[in-house]
């Protein structure tokens, strides 16, 4: 069944508008964005797709292929439920707060982006929905404003204290390009990935939820460390600053991760521009050690995937990507070796631990399943 058929079966008529947005994989620079620092994501081929139709009243009816049932609410009466519809409610509540006029609508969502896998299914959903609503209600805002609206929906309504990386990556990122973002100035730079560069992304299958627990703790620790160091954000701390070691633990470790990770992003941009893949691989490795030991956001399943990747003769570097506490790993190799590396790592993992890691890149699934896989 095509997306259109699914919509018609669900709501009894066809949709007016479709839109989509990609997931993203962060190459390097994790837990730097809410510290005013640097990140380097790239768009995935996997996308979240939405279909929409206007209603005559102010009701919203929403369904997702990834969640059972149809959920509904009235515009102007958005209330947090703890369910996936909060991302939809967040978007309509923020648009209303910005003075944008909406009417009711029916929505169907489907996605190839793993949900809760550290590959930004949440921002892909927000960005795809905002693109769809922009068309449906002829709203005027550009892709940077769209990212900011999506970010507000997730932080202010859903309550996940994430930085701006994901929404900018899903709104502005393109496949085959790394998107360098200075999250303080919001200066962006696209850097073409060298053709010989190969990325393997494997979802551990351990889901996380950034609107709860540990992510908030890490963010609070960073804010506490910045206050103790007398700076606005950890972005403002120099990697060589002797005061870092004087902080109590775990604040010293957390700070060390953030300040060195920022430097690694800048070094990674230089390595990419020079086509120096071994240097980029070393930065991946250092970043993983830092996420594991200093920021403490890795898990045994993730560490195993990274260790198995690192043992592969064709792998140049590997790291946990995204917020952590589950999620995915990104592995650097040569383009020619991506399929072999992915299969070898998953096979080796399955011989040791239960669970089913899923290969996200290279993407082997047929895109023709999704005829509505449109750019915007
Ligand atoms: P991720 O790393 O995938 O962004 P998050 O925890 O930030 O993980 O977001 C995952 C949440 O986003 C899900 O629990 C769900 O509420 C929502 N979500 C994302 N994609 C979809 C989808 N296709 N259908 C329904 N809900 C989705
Ligand atoms: Mg997310």
Image: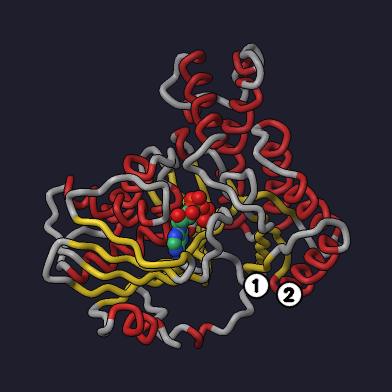
Within-10-Å neighbours for mark 2: few <14, some 14–19, many 20+: some
Q: Is residue 47 left or right of residue 203?
A: left
Residue at image point 72% right, 43% down = 299
Picture quarter containing residue 205?
bottom right
Residue at image point 46% right, 71% down = 65
Residue linked to disc 1:
362
Quadrant position of the N terminus in the picture: bottom left
Q: Nearer the viewer, residue 80 or 324?
A: 80
Residue at image point 33% right, 52% down = 150
Expressed as whole percent of the image width and height from the top left, the position of residue 249 reads 66, 18
Expressed as whole percent of the image width and height from the top left, the position of residue 136 reads 19, 71
- Which comes before the other along the chain, label 2 or label 1? 2
Residue linked to disc 2:
339
Expressed as whole percent of the image width and height from the top left, the position of residue 371 reads 42, 86
Find the distance from the CA under tag 2 to the CA under tag 1.
Answer: 6 Å
The figure's colour scheme reads secondary structure
With respect to residue 375, does 357 lie above or below? Answer: above
């Amino acid at each position: 069944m095509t997306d259109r058929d699914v919509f018609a079966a669900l709501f009894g008529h066809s949709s007016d508008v479709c839109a989509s947005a990609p997931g993203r994989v962060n190459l390097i620079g994790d837990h730097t964005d809410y510290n005013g620092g640097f990140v380097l994501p790239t768009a995935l081929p996997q996308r979240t797709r939405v279909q929409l139709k206007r209603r005559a009243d102010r009701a919203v009816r929403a369904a997702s292929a990834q969640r059972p049932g149809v959920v509904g609410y009235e515009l102007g009466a958005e209330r947090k439920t703890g369910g996936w519809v909060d991302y939809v409610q967040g978007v309509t509540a923020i648009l209303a707060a910005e003075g944008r006029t909406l009417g009711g609508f029916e929505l169907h969502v489907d996605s190839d982006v793993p949900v809760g896998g550290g590959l930004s299914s949440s921002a892909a959903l927000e960005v795809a929905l905002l693109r769809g609503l922009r068309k449906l209600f002829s709203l005027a805002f550009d892709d940077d404003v769209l990212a900011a609206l999506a970010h507000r929906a997730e932080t202010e309504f859903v309550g996940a204290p994430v930085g701006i990386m994901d929404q900018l990556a899903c709104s502005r990122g393109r496949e085959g390009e790394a998107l360098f973002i200075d999250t303080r100035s919001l200066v962006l730079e696209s850097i073409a990935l060298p053709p010989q560069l190969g990325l393997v992304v494997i979802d551990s299958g351990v889901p996380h939820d950034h609107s709860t627990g540990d992510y908030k703790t890490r963010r609070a620790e960073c804010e506490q460390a910045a206050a103790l160091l007398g700076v606005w954000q950890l972005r403002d701390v120099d990697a060589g600053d002797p005061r870092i070691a004087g902080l109590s633990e775990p604040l010293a470790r957390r700070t060390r991760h953030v300040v060195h990770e920022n430097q690694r992003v800048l070094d990674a941009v230089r390595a990419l521009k020079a086509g120096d893949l071994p240097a980029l691989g070393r930065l991946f490795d250092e970043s993983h050690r830092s996420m594991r030991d200093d920021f403490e956001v890795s898990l045994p399943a993730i560490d195993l995937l990274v260790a198995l990747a690192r043992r592969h003769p064709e792998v140049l570097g590997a790291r946990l990507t995204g917020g952590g506490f589950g999620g995915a790993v990104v592995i650097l190799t040569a383009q020619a070796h991506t399929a072999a590396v992915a299969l070898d790592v998953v096979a080796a993992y399955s011989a040791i631990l239960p669970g089913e890691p899923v290969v996200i890149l290279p993407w082997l699934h047929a895109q023709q399943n999704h005829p509505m896989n449109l750019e915007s």
